[in-house]
Image (cartoon, grey):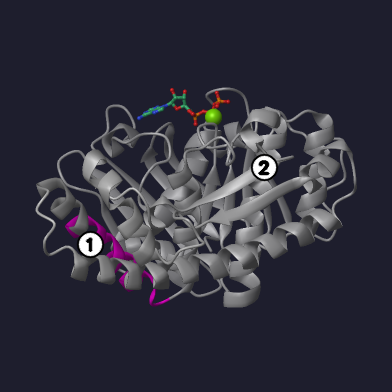
Amino acid sequence: MISEIKLNNFRCFKSSSISLSPEINFFYGANGSGKTSILEALYMCSSGRSFKSSNVQSLISFDEEVFSITGYDSSRGYTLQIIKNKTNPISIKVNNTKITTSKLIKEFPATAIHNNTFSFANAAPDFRRKMVDRSLFVSDIGFSETWFAFYKTLKQRNSIIKSRNINNIDPWNKKFSEEGEVLHKKRLVFFEQSLKEFKDILSKLNPCRTTKYLEQTTIEYSPGWDSGLGIYEALLENQSRDLVRKTTTTGPHKADIKININNVEAKQILSRGEQKILSILWCCSQHEVLRKIYNINATLIIDDIKSELDNTTFEIFLDLLKHLNNQIIFSCIDDHFSSKIKPENKDFKKFHVEQLK
Ligand SMILES: Nc1ncnc2c1ncn2[C@@H]1O[C@H](COP(=O)(O)OP(=O)(O)OP(=O)(O)O)[C@@H](O)[C@H]1O
Ligand SMILES: [Mg+2]
């Protein structure tokens, strides 16, 4: 995990160094002070990309040619350097050696919750699927091979379906179902482990109206095909529909996590605050699985924690902090910890963003 970060010509930061806690980090400050920018830089240390802009060049401070982010992980003695100048592609190095983003996430795993992705329940299925996949990429050495093999076969099958020349489709159906089965099983195991943690965390929180509500929520893994059938049988059954739609309509690439309350989709029922706390709890559950089962400490980054949350729901978050063991980094406009005692028994660091410049 990142214990120190240095920003140079990154957005509104000319030159700033921040020493982070391995546990709880809180950034506060007025609009435009740079909270999102700091969290964005920290998320870049895991993903190599920004959660805010698709154009990395826009992160270079105005009138400058290059930004750099330097990270240090004191527990392992690892260094990280991200450099982007206007003319060259982004360069990412761990311990002075170039690294791809798919390897970077394994070195510095992190999940970010920000205003565009605060609702896990309201997002598209691929968002929830990718959340599970990302954790598997980090924790399971064989997962990337499994994943790439399946998606390559899916692409092949789709081009056969599109060509409508399906005489030789059977070997592809078999390959698809074999590789899909391996992928599905890995996802299902991780999902079940996460669900167990989710229930466990929920049971530890002080009961209130929202936690009672969340206890009524059912979270189920939906494999992406009629689970009464094998994948191969499901492909055969849906082949004519696939030909009409010109794509493979069933299979593990359609997997989802279904969240329901009284058999109605949670996004139709839950308030925005309830959706946000549900997302936070789910991320924490996945991170607990990574920590407990795979000994991986992933960082949770939450921008603008207080938006959507009223005081009661914010109390759930504060209560949650007591039960977390991983690094967490979050921001807010106001200093919500001025009158509160810092979270018990935790290494808590508070930063006034204006003073970091
Ligand atoms: N490339 C850039 N160069 C210089 N300044 C920039 C650049 N990109 C963004 N900024 C400015 O950096 C400042 C900090 O933005 P940021 O989004 O981090 O603020 P924030 O503290 O999260 O504010 P809010 O509370 O409104 O979310 C803003 O004034 C923004 O206009
Ligand atoms: Mg912001």
Can see residue 248?
yes
> Does the beta carbon of the residue at mark 2 sit less than 8 Å from ligand 2?
no
Answer yes or no: is residue 97 visible: no
Query: x, y percentage for residue 52?
Result: 42, 35
Which image quadrant for residue 285? bottom right
Say above or below: 329 vs 148: above
- Does residue 214 show up magenta in the picture? no
Residue nearest the observer in this picture, 58 or 326: 326
Q: Judging from the image, what secondary structure is the residue with disc 2 in?
A: strand
Residue 39: horizontal and vertical position, in percent? 52, 43
Residue 250: image x %, image y %?
37, 52
Q: CA distance from mark 1 to mark 2?
A: 32 Å
The answer to whether 249 appears left or right of 12 in the picture is: left
Where does residue 198 sit, x and y in percent of width and height?
A: 71, 57
The amino acid beneath tag 1 is Lys
Residue plotted at (62% across, 33% down) = 267
- Say what amino acid the circle numbered 2 marks: Asn
Residue at image x 19%, y 38%?
86
The question of residue 152 being in magenta is answered with yes
Residue named by callout 2: 260
Tag 2 or tag 1, which sits nearer the N-term?
1
Under circle 1, the secondary element is: helix
Q: Is residue 129 above or below residue 116?
A: below
